[in-house]
Image (cartoon, helix red, strand yellow):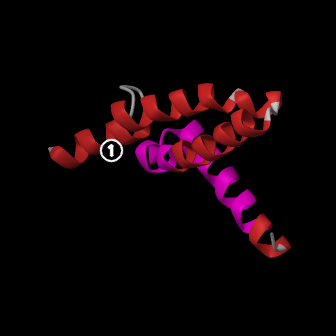
């Protein structure tokens, strides 16, 4: 992979992690996690790489975030409540 493209994806993952910690754009960021962990987990199983097999657990966590959305205490939930009033 081209080095600048690697930096771009690293930046996206870092920003995604920050938004998850802050509770913003949870569903949008979890789509990234579902795609990434499906690819890396499948590679771990196909090629027998134990370090990548744990990614199916991370895939399950990303799916939970994607399907359930934001938690009660997240900023997304607070902002949507205020916008609805």
- Residue closest to the eye, 30 or 37: 37
Examine the image and state in which quarter residue 47 appears.
top right
Q: Tell me what residue is drawn at x 56 percent, y 33 percent.
A: 59
Q: Tell me what residue is drawn at x 64 percent, y 54 percent.
A: 15
Residue at mark 1: 79
Q: Which residues are magenta?
A: 7-31
Q: Tell me what residue is drawn at x 24 percent, y 39 percent.
A: 81
Q: Quadrant of the C terminus?
A: top left
Residue 12 image position (x, y, % from top left): 65, 59
Residue 31 image position (x, y, % from top left): 47, 48
Q: Is residue 27 visible?
A: yes
Where 53 falls versus 17 (above or below)?
Answer: above
Residue 14 image position (x, y, % from top left): 69, 51
In this rendering, would 65 be left or right of 54? left
Q: Secondary structure at mark 1?
A: helix
Q: Residue furthest left?
A: 85
Q: Residue furthest right?
A: 3
- Residue closest to the eye, 85 or 45: 45
Where 1 falls versus 28 (above or below)?
Answer: below
- Residue closest to the eye, 65 or 48: 48
Q: Tell me what residue is drawn at x 70 percent, y 61 percent.
A: 9
The answer to whether residue 70 is magenta is: no
Q: Quadrant of the N terminus?
A: bottom right
């Amino acid at each position: 992979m081209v080095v600048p493209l690697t930096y771009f994806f690293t930046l996206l993952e870092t920003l995604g992690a920050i938004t998850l910690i802050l509770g913003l754009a949870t569903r949008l960021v979890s789509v990234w996690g579902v795609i990434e962990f499906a690819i890396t987990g499948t590679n771990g199983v196909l090629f027998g790489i134990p370090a990548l097999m744990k990614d199916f657990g991370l895939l399950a966590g990303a799916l939970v975030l994607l399907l359930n959305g934001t938690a009660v205490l997240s900023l997304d939930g607070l902002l949507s409540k205020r916008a609805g009033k």
